[in-house]
Amino acid sequence: MKRRPFWTLLALPGGELVEDTSLPALGRNGSCSVPLSPEDMIPMPFGAEICLLPGRRPPGKPLSGDRRPFSNAASAILPPGYLRLLLPAFQRNPRAPTLPLLGFTCVAWRDDRFWVAAQETDDTRKWDPSQYHTVGLPHLIKARLKRRPENRLLSHLAVCALDSGCYNAQNIFYERWEGGIPVSPACNSTCRGCISLQPSKRVPSPQNRISFVPTVEEMTEVVLHHLESSPEAIASFG
């Protein structure tokens, strides 16, 4: 039985996203472009976002032999709880801008829906995007800071929750599940793709690292409150 192909998505200059049913989609594994296997693809989960990759064309030639209009390659950013299996495949223009440090994933089109190269790994109930960024979040943060205005760690977590959109920081104010506890402005790793510190201005960090070391009292106050008041509580330090 012949497999139905996954088709390439094209991001047109005007912002329109279209499928090219003459161009089978490819993903990238390391430095190699590879055909998409059904075993690697799942329907795009709720909360994923489609992004264009500026200055990067989809690879390959249409089966029809027709010339394609200028277009950018498309990609997806997965919600938490999913592991990406393939990167987006593209041909880069030498003048293409540097991409931000985001988890771009291979995305394609088949059977009137989007598909991504990914695998579900976690309990997605706790990472469902509809559970976060709720209308009441700013009120919860304001009320918590009003009760503990002197706690610098709590103030920093408020910035992480609202400005960086960190789910674990938001959980501190929702009082549930895994709560993030940043404690160090330094790190003993030197990850090239560090999301909180980049020496080069060409690749800005998507979030700012904590700039101080919280006191034991500040940390204890936040951690104990979370463990005592939150269902299925976890405190993760970083």
Image: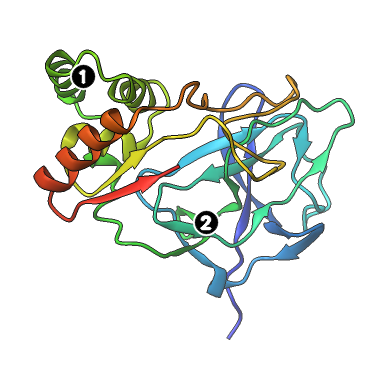
**In the image, residue 149 lies at what x, y percent?**
21, 13
Q: Residue furthest right?
A: 94
Q: Which residue is under mark 1?
A: 138
**42 above or below 79?**
below
From the viewer's perspective, is 93 left or right of 12?
A: right
C-alpha distance separating marks 1 and 2: 32 Å
Write the residue at 49% across / 34% down.
Answer: 184
The residue at the far bottom in this view is 1
Where does the N terminus fall, quadrant-wise? bottom right
Q: Earlier in the sequence, mark 1 or mark 2?
A: 2
> Residue 82 appears at what percent x and percent y?
44, 57
- Point 59% across, 62% down: residue: 85
Residue 121, located in which quarter of the rendered image?
Answer: bottom left
What count of labels does the image hold?
A: 2
Against 38, residue 131 (above or below) is: above
Say what amino acid the circle numbered 1 marks: Pro
Q: Is the image coloured rainbow, by chain, by secondary structure, or in one colour?
A: rainbow
Q: Residues within 10 Å of mark 1 (few under 14, many from 20)?
A: some
Residue 163 in view = yes
Q: Which residue is mark 2?
A: 116
